Amino acid sequence: MPKSSNQLALARQWEMLKKLPCRGPGITAGELASYLREEKQFEVSKRTVERDLIELAATFGIRCNDSSMPYGWHWLPGKQCDFTSIDLADAMSLVLAGDVLAKLLPSPMLTALQPKFALARSKLAAVETHRYARWADKVRHVPTSMSFVPPKVDAQVLATVQEALLQERQVLVVYTAPSDKKAGEITLHPLSLILRGSTPYLVATAYDYHDVRLYAIHRMKAATLSERRMVPPRHYTTDGYLASGAMQFGHGKTIRLKAWVSNELGIYLAEAPLAEAQTIKAKGARHLVTAVVANSWQLRWWILSQGAGITVISPAHLKTEITDTLKSAAGNYK
């Protein structure tokens, strides 16, 4: 083979290794061939790609996921090679980010990032006397709320849901709702994947219905990718969904909250307001806060978490609800 052909084959295989995902179900030889032709301008056939993959598997930690059709290729756990270099500042940032994400993300989501974190740690270890390496020992992240252990998420289920989102296809899931004792099959039209705290949710519609709902990924026991295209609701956007307050477990409506707060809480809210539309006035040892906020379960949780530091004035229905909840809670301690 001429030297130029050898170099061309090497360049092609390099791009293939860069494209391989770090976990199953992987990418097929046909998809790789299309990627190389359309995005990298290599004139290559599916058969040539298949031969390349078999050859590369003898040297690199890649495998063919032949458990189901079509067969996909991916890196083995912990074997993914990094084809780019990072500098010390990047390495420091990655190590710090890894410490934070390890407490927030379900383990399947972390798997794809582990090679990057490992590269960053090895980079810092090699220059442990450099000030950037020492900086990583001086910075920490502390959550502002209770630090919950991420729910256990099935890695294959998460991968299938992500693939359905990418390909804009329907997905059949075996799902157990909080109010149900038995799991049931649901056909979903995936719209968005949103991480709320440490819990990943799929925003989707079910069957031919148009109402948008939340489905916790950890409550999915199995997922199967459908050949049918998903049908999104008219005018749906991820940002629009978030702006509606749905991820605060509300109904998209707002209220004008008016409350007395303690001096300590008033100082905090002056620095980190409840909303853009907030006013706060000091009145002796208290502060009067007025803010337009989402009428949601999360708002109620936050108010109750402040204990004696807040007194709701209006709206009246919220004041009554909080009062009744606190009376009930106090009764539990009698």
Image: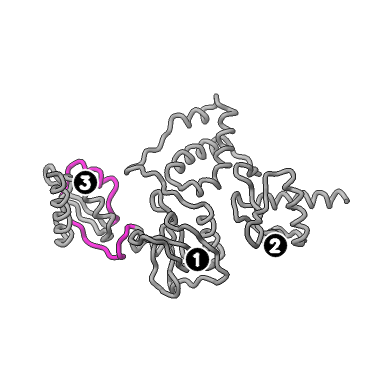
Label 2: element kind: helix
Q: Are marks 2 and 3 in contact (CB under 8 Å)?
A: no
The range drawn in magenta is: 248-276
Amino acid on which the number 3 mark rests in the picture: Gln
Mark 3: give few (<14), some (14-19) or many (20+) Cα within 10 Å: few
First in sequence: mark 2 vs mark 1 = 2
Picture residue at 23% right of the left edge, 62% below the top:
255
Q: Which residue is mark 2?
A: 30
For label 3, the residue is 306
Image spot of residue 316 (x, y percent): 14, 61
Residue 28, by quadrant, is bottom right
Front tag of 2 and 1 = 1
Question: Does residue 270 appear left or right of residue 22 in this picture?
Answer: left
Which label is found at residue 172?
A: 1
Across the whole image, how many numbered discs are drawn on residues? 3
Q: Position of residue 152 (x, y in %)?
A: 44, 49
Check if residue 275 falls in the magenta segment.
yes
Identity of the amino acid at label 1?
Leu
Query: How many residues crowd mark 1 within 10 Å: few (<14), some (14–19), many (20+)?
Result: many
Does the magenta-highlighted stretch encompass residue 155?
no
Residue, x 45% and y 67% (percent of image)? 186
Whether pointer 1 and pointer 3 mark residues with C-beta atoms closer than 8 Å, the reply is: no
Rendered location of residue 110, percent (x, y): 51, 46
Query: Where does residue 273 sit, x and y in percent of width and height?
Result: 28, 50
